[in-house]
Amino acid sequence: MIDLVKKLLILCWVAGVVVAANAAEVVWDFESLQNVAPPSWAPKSPTGHVSEAEDIACENGSLTFTSKKPHCYFWLNFAETVEGTAFDAKQFHFLKIRFQSPAPGKITLFYSSPDGEMANMDSAIEVVEGWNEYEIDLQDMTFGREVHSPEGKNYERWGGDLQQVKGLRIDTWFPADTTVKFDYIKLSDEKVGQK
Ligand SMILES: [Ca+2]
């Protein structure tokens, strides 16, 4: 019985995300730590792993943590959304983040592709103090400038050659002992204000 309830809960959760995907938006709303992946080296560990952080929690619909070092990072939990599949980078390329910090800093990110490629965005999102929404068009960005492929190209576009994204890592750059909050992270096919 407990297993059945668990399965139903998981199905409801997945269904919620599928509905969001039909609306051309994939949302990590941080209602629970299930939105944050386990450590990449221990995928069966509990969800909610943030590297070099403490006091990690989802409170009032926001992910909050305090940095132990100037660089922290976490992977969004794709396994809980569309298990075994990847997102179409061509469709989902507007990244929206609602975020709070007590001081200026930076957010950077990596995508990973089903072919094993992992590349970081060449420019950082410059963060200002307080609650703010940040939106960037990932198709305008270059990734992995330091990576040199056999073909000689030294950068990738969002989603790489496959144009598929199966993972997204979020990195925060603030002084140690900074407490930050994420209200949501969304991948959308629309700009803010467009319908
Ligand atoms: Ca939220």
Image (cartoon, rainbow, N blue to C red):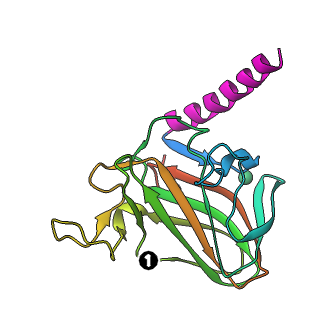
Q: Is residue 117 above or below residue 47?
A: below
Determine the secondary structure under disc 1. loop
Residue 126, horizontal then vertical, whole percent: 56, 79
Dot 1 amino acid type: Ser
* Residue lying at 80% horizontally and 68% vertically, measured from the top left: 54
Residue 135, horizontal then vertical, whole percent: 52, 64
* Residue lying at 30% horizontally and 65% vertically, measured from the top left: 156
Q: Is residue 24 above or below residue 137?
A: above
Left or right: residue 149 compared with residue 60: left
**Magenta stretch, residue numbers:** 1-23
Viewer-proximal residue among 136 and 150: 150
Viewer-proximal residue among 19 and 88: 88
The residue singled out by tag 1 in the image is 123
* Residue lying at 71% horizontally and 45% vertically, measured from the top left: 34
Residue 133, horizontal then vertical, whole percent: 62, 66
Viewer-proximal residue among 150 and 71: 150
**Residue placed farthest to the front in the image?**
41
Q: Residues within 10 Å of mark 1 (few under 14, many from 20)?
A: some
Residue 65, horizontal then vertical, whole percent: 77, 67
Prevalent SS, magenta region: helix
Could you tell me how many numbered marks the image carries? 1
